[in-house]
Amino acid sequence: MRDTPEIETLPVHIDADEVERRARELEWSDPDELPDELPTVMPYRSELLPRSVGAAVDDIAERMQCPPDYPAASMLVAMAAVVGCRLGIRPRRYDDWLVVPNLWGCVVGRPSLKKTPATKGAERQLRHIEARAREALQSDIEDAELDAVLLPEQRKLLEQQIKAALKKGDEEAARNHASALQDLQEVQPPEPRRIIAKECSIQKLIEMLGRHPGGMMLFVDELLGWMRKLDRDDQGGVRQIYLSLWNGTEVVNDDTIGRGELTARGCVSLFGCFTPGGLTSYVSAAIRGGRGDDGLVQRLQICVWPDSPKDYKSVDRWPDNQAKDRLRETFERLADIDAQAIGELDRYDEDGIPFMRFDADAQELFDTWDLNHQRRLRAGDLPEAFESHLSKYASMVPSIALLLHLASGDEGAVSATATQSAIRWAEYLESHAQRLYAVATSPQRQHAGPLLRRLIDWPKDKPIRTSVIAKRGWSGLASTEVVDETLALLAEAGWVQSVRVNTGGRPTTDWFVHPEAANFLQIYQRETTKTPETTPDETFGGFDGSGLVRFPDNGVCDVEVIV
């Protein structure tokens, strides 16, 4: 950034010609092109999901006119919630490391992109599974309710019979009636499976997990408010419980006075929505050592932040019922899996969770990917927060592979096809995570372009000052700190220059815009009419630019070990 010159006095209101004259007196060179406001991400492709799910995702995205990434991410996390910790996968050939498909995810976008409605399709599938379970047990529930009505009368009758037998001196009959009375127990009607939880306390959630140990799904529409609530000092213990719940196999306890001891195996999938500004501000604070710097954000593995569609068309048609039927059948199949029949059991494993393994080809694929992945993480070339995020992919890839394998209706060991798709998911999700952390660490890149365009149109008779810009309340530019950082970026690129002004009181700094800024902006916009998108067949290299897995046009996974 250039040194800031100093001039004597620049009043609050000045002649527009005087501003232009002073600006042209400064030394200017051709400005550099501004960085993209958002780093490029890989677009979603329906091949990432089995056709039985992908067709419904495409149908929702077209009718909602929203990015397909939104329904796709929510469907994947919902599939994880249905399977839960009933079945896991051991990613190693011989090791006893167990992974259950417990996923946390979110969608990021402006309010106009219909994030919440786009994810309702996944919630409806879970509601259907719950309703189906209730219907299957309805007759048993009704019988239990009748038994509950009869129970008090049966007790009274037996008590009367005991008294009558004792009066007659028939002790044996009295003892028989007493034994029958002891056998009478409170009627516990069968409880159908619950999957969805919303807006519940941690105590209630643990209680529900105790009754539904297969796993649950926590839907949080506005994740920012939920996470900020966990930041409070009185929520420290709750936050730690949620961090443990992410593992999917941990036993969690709550010993709150007044509720007694609550214990349950925690397997909770999580899904919600973020606006870009809310998420990046939260992640920025976490990266800088705020309360959120404990890995909570990094657990949002299935985080998608797609490009906003540039066009909108009115679509008013019936949903694709064939796609809806296939989607429903897929979720029912996941709900009905017989984990004991298709999985193995380890007599040394206290969890008692059945598990599957990769087949030979899938194992080779995963081993090679994991080797490259772990070497990359240990190279020390990645920002710490981003490295922590990517470290969670070691369990995410086998989790997704297991889910895709089961959703496809395949039997036996997890296939290479499902594993290859899971690796593609990792590459796709990494590009979206890169966007998140790049913007969080440099929020000014989002604001540089909009601020420059506003400065070009700034009233010529008023000096440009940081405090004045902050008071305008423009999106993302409400604090002088962010305004200063954004102006510094523009200055570094040669679009603006600062001048120290002696007003007779406290010194201040005024900013001048490049006299030809509008012309250069038009030139750069003509040269780059659209930000290039990474195609699904290209490799996303991440922050360090090192490609790990390449997927050529023929669809064959060509994995190279980096030595």
Image (cartoon, grey):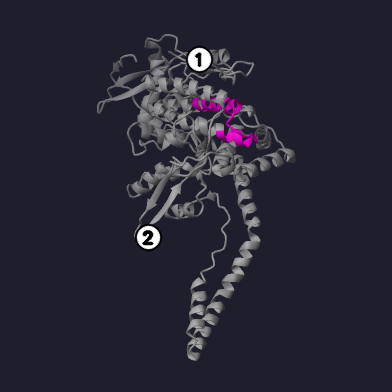
Residue for badge 1: 560
Q: Which quadrant holds the C terminus?
A: top left
Residue at image position (57%, 41%) is 78
The picture quadrant where one finds residue 330 is top right
Residue at image position (62%, 49%) is 129
Q: Residues within 10 Å of mark 1 (few under 14, many from 20)?
A: few
Residue in front for this viewpoint, 73 or 244: 244
Q: Looking at this rendering, what residue extends furthest in the left direction?
A: 505
Image coords of residue 548 (percent x, y):
49, 18
Image coords of residue 193 (percent x, y):
57, 53
Residue in front for this viewpoint, 307 or 501: 307
Which label's residue is closer to the chain start, 2 or 1?
Answer: 2
Residue for badge 2: 260
Image coords of residue 405 (percent x, y):
60, 33
Which labelled disc corresponds to residue 98? Answer: none
Image coords of residue 284 (percent x, y):
39, 32
Would you say 541 lies left or right of 67 here? Answer: left
Three-letter code, disc 2? Gly
Would you say 329 lies left or right of 365 here? Answer: right
Residue at image position (59%, 66%) is 144
Residue in front for this viewpoint, 491 or 105: 105
- The region drawn magenta spans 402-430
